[in-house]
Image (cartoon, rainbow, N blue to C red):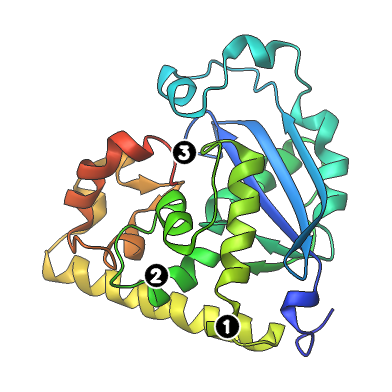
Amino acid sequence: MNDDSLWKGCPLAVVDVETTGLDPKVDRVIEIAVIEMRDGEVTDRFAALVNPDQEVPDEVVRITGIQPEQLVGAPRFATLAAEVRARLEGRVFVAYNLPFDRAFIKAELERAGLDFPEVVPIDPLVFIRELHKNQGSKRLGAVAERLGISLENAHRAADDAEVAGRILYALAPQLPARLGDLRLLQGQWERQQANDMAGWRNRRGGGMEAVGGGLAQERGNALGPAYIYGDDTDPVRYMFVHLPDSGARRT
């Protein structure tokens, strides 16, 4: 797999995690899925509940439907770490709002004494922010609905991960075919989106750090440009309007 490869034919490891909170330094994974896909089809599935060894907030229980008692007998991440790492290594790592999932998996692997493997990171959300710029919400469920992709169990790792992969494939006609070109475009759009958010902060004389503190986070990262491309151009207002739907999650 190299930059000249056609990305649709590359092995994708599409990942999603459910967590006890937003901070990978202190919060823990309670569910993980790695859905392997190639040429638009699922080729293998791995999904597991994880005992986080800490209390699961009521809001997370409400959003995910995962009950604390389900986690008591579940394996700890350290037990799953080697398999998770093996399923990621050498693949295209795909996640919707990738920095969040990557940060949590990296933290969990490090706790288990393992490093994060070498992967090619691809984030469908970066492309959605541009290609669906004026089409409303960028939440996973809303995007899936616009694209005609079924999401039966939102906020569960396996379903969210598979839908993230299907969204990426659905965008393929609008994206470069070669992996290297896809990575280049992603980098360009990420920088553009970061610059747009920096401009938003400058115009308002402060930024997200001054408003909302920990609430001004979307899956572990500042709400940022994900929200300046929806129907509402004010990210702070968007956050509070949509918080009941998204809770601690981003779908």
**In the image, farthest residue toward the left:** 204
Q: Give the vertical position of 23 relative to 137 (above or below).
A: above
Q: Badge 3: few (under 14), some or many (20 or more) residues near its Cα, within 10 Å?
A: many
Residue at 12% in and 71% down = 203
Q: Can the viewer see residue 116 in this picture?
A: no
Mark 3 or 2 closer to N-term? 3
Relative horizontal placement of residue 1, taking residue 184 as reference (left or right)? right
- Find residue 102 and name its label: none
Q: Residues within 10 Å of mark 1 (few under 14, many from 20)?
A: few
For badge 1, the amino acid type reads Pro
**On the picture, is 68 further left or further right than 204?**
right
Q: Residue at x 80, y 45 (%)?
A: 45
Inter-mark Cα distance, 3 to 2: 22 Å
The residue type indicated by label 3 comes to: Leu
3 and 2 marks in contact (CB < 8 Å): no
Identify the residue position indicated by label 2 in the image.
129
- Helix, strand or loop at label 2? It is helix
Q: Residue at x 12, y 64 (%)?
A: 205
Q: Earlier in the sequence, mark 2 or mark 1?
A: 2
Q: Is residue 180 left or right of residue 246?
A: right
- Closer to us: mark 2 or mark 1? 1
**Residue 234 spot, x, y in % from top left:** 17, 59
